Amino acid sequence: MCLGRQMPELPEVETIARGLRSSLEGRTIRAVTVDWPRTVAQPPLDEFRERIAGRRVESVGRRGKFVVIGLDGGCLLIHLKMSGRLRVVPAGEPVEDHTHTIFHLDGDWELRFQDVRKFGRVHLVEKPVQVTAALGPEPLDHDFTLDHFRALLVRRTGRLKSLLMNQEFLAGLGNIYADEALHAARLHPLRTADSLSPDEQAHLYHSIRRVLGRAVADRGTTLDDGGYQDAEGRAGAYQEELAVYRRTGEPCHSCGTLIQRTVIGGRSSHFCPTCQPQQLEGEA
Ligand code: ZN
């Protein structure tokens, strides 16, 4: 794994999708240039080029960490993975390094997908569900209720940190917002899902929604390495609000205890040992 890179999570992808909406909706994709074929996950590249040409963009949204671009025939799903950036720019603007996919739009505009590490993927399918079928619910949806969350937890025994990052459990959380939601809920990242009391379940549900909601309002988190930019090339502001993520050795804003870091499932987890005690009862 790479510590230095920030994978966009729900708030960052939501901000990118909102930024793309006004510049993409109503535009027609004339053609596409792909210089790193593996970026196109499906269909085969020749078919992708043929089917995308002439399609009009009808909507831009998000599902989990995917940008979902609805067309007048099928839809494009783009996953930014570790380093992807999407921008709509005039065709005459110099092309930045690592721009491997360019959608040529009418009116001399281009949607450019820049991806230093080349892990980003583009899918062209009839319906989004062909790509997103396995994703869990959207944590910010109005119909995602506390009862719904409690039902998801039934029979789950995994560590909370790993569970929150599991896209089949809930869609959209990654390392940053899982750590932040657990601190807000005063739950240690190594607690197991089946150890939560009903009150703790409720606290976690509300913390997830509050943290994600504020991060969307702040247009995402941009860490010092500058990995994430929105569709206009701007940084987010939620890094000012982070309580634990990448604050190892700094005092907790709530209690002053120094934030600790541990590795769970190959990912670093940041927590306050006072606010988030690891309850050991029941563990011999
Ligand atoms: Zn604390």
Image (cartoon, rainbow, N blue to C red):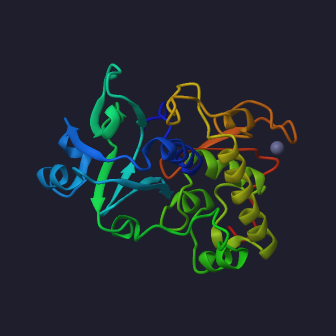
> Is residue 195 rendered to the left or right of residue 66?
right
> Is residue 166 rendered to the left or right of residue 27?
right
Count of marks, rendered view:
0
Quarter holding residue 89: top left
Residue for point 74% across, 70% down = 201
Depth check: give the residue in front, 49 or 27. 27
Residue 156 position (above or below residue 13): below
- The N terminus appears in which quarter of the rendering? top left
Residue 35 position (above or below residue 151): above
Position of residue 137 measured from the top left corner of the image (x, y, whole percent): 55, 69
Position of residue 75 measured from the top left corner of the image (x, y, whole percent): 34, 60
Position of residue 131 measured from the top left corner of the image (x, y, whole percent): 35, 64
Query: Please, which residue is most extreme toward the left here?
Result: 46
Query: Please, which residue is most extreme toward the right here?
Result: 255
Residue 89 position (above or below residue 69): above
- The C terminus appears in which quarter of the rendering? bottom right
> Is residue 11 rendered to the left or right of residue 105?
right
> Is residue 282 rendered to the left or right of residue 111?
right
Residue for point 53% across, 26% down = 226
Residue 8 seen in render: no
Residue for point 59% across, 62% down = 159
Depth check: give the residue in front, 206 or 183. 206
Query: Please, which residue is most extreme toward the top here?
Result: 94
State ligand 1's quadrant: top right
Residue for point 34% across, 36% down = 107
Query: Please, which residue is most extreme toward the front here?
Result: 107
Depth check: give the residue in front, 108 or 201. 108
Position of residue 43 measured from the top left corner of the image (x, y, whole percent): 19, 58
